[in-house]
Image (tube, rainbow, N blue to C red):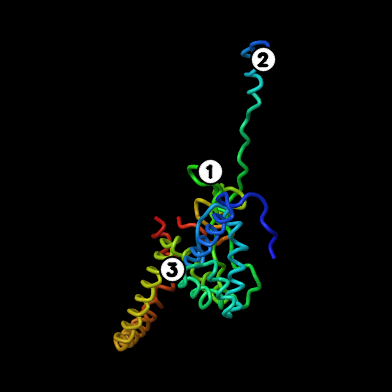
Amino acid sequence: MPTPTKGARLGGSPAHQRLMLANLATALFENGRITTTEAKARRLRPFAERLVTKAKRGDLHARRQVAAVIRNKAVVHELFTEIAPGYAGRAGGYVRITKIGPRKGDNAPMAVIEMVEPLAEQTVAEATAATKRAAKDRDENAAEKSTEAALDAAVAEVAELAEENQDEILAEAEADTAEIDAEAADSDTPAGDPSDEEPDTKK
Amino acid sequence: MAVPKRKMSRSNPRSRRSQWKANPVALTKCDRCGSAKLPHTACQTCGTYNKRAVLDV
């Protein structure tokens, strides 16, 4: 159980605070992530987590207790059927608060309060984050991909050409061997006096 | 009603106010993009906190 809140009510009166927290919790369950002031986020977190715990219990009494706070029946249904089952393996800590710095206008410290990803979807979220990071370095990746594609295409062309020209290559090879034999026969005579040729190239 | 007995010299308030100073804001480096940011706060430049995307940039 979180410690009871100290100090003045949000908005001035207990009724105002109750309504504000109910509206904030409704918006949080509806959207998964909301941006608000840090003070409201800090008050909202134990409030919303208690509602999630009730939703995990899932019986009619728990549903009535949640419906007494959240007036939107669609949101109550979504909380019980979609949000709560995802947190079956998590013992508390369903909501995350991240500070995002002061607001322009009144310099109020702001925060993003969001539902923590269910354990099964955590890997998916990491994958999407990785793709986002990859998208930021898109230029490099695009260049690499184009070079890879070009390489693949070149390899395929070479393979096709090799198949087509196999006969020609064989014929050329035979011709080459014949030429080499002829050269070997020729090279016997100049190989005897290479000293005459070297000074000529130097000059 | 209590009132000041004497006029304050110009030097007196000025020397008092010479101690009004602004403190430098404590900043840390974002561990993802390296730009300066408030500690324990999401980076305004790349919108991440603890390598997790928080803001839409």
Residue in front for this viewpoint, A167 or A23: A23
The image shows residue A176, relative to residue A91, as above or below, that is: below
Classify mark 2: residues with Cα within 10 Å, few (<14), some (14-19) or many (20+).
Answer: few
Q: Position of residue A35 (x, y in %)?
A: 50, 56
- Decide which of A153, B17 is in the foreground and name it: B17
Q: Nearer the viewer, residue A132 or A70?
A: A70
Give me the residue at 49% from left, 74% from top: A78
Horizontal and vertical percent position of residue A194? 44, 68
What residue is shown with label 3? Answer: A194
Q: Which mark is residue A52?
A: none
Could you say whether the residue bearing mark 2 is in a helix, strand or loop? loop
- How far apart, in angstroms, are the residues tagged by discs 3 and 1? 91 Å
Q: Is residue B17 above or below residue B29?
A: above
| Disc nearer the start of the sequence (3/1) | 1
Discs 3/2, front: 2
User: Could you give the CA–CA distance between mark 3 and mark 2, rounded to whole angstroms?
Assistant: 118 Å
Mark 2 or 1: in front is: 2
Residue carrying label 2: B4
- Residue at 35 percent of width and 80 percent of height: A156
| Residue at screen point 45% across, 72% down | A74
Name the quadrant of the C terminus of chain A: bottom left
Q: Amino acid at mark 3?
A: Pro
Secondary structure state at the residue bearing disc 3: loop
Labels 2 and 1 positioned on one and the same chain: no
Q: What residue would you read off at disc 1?
A: A107
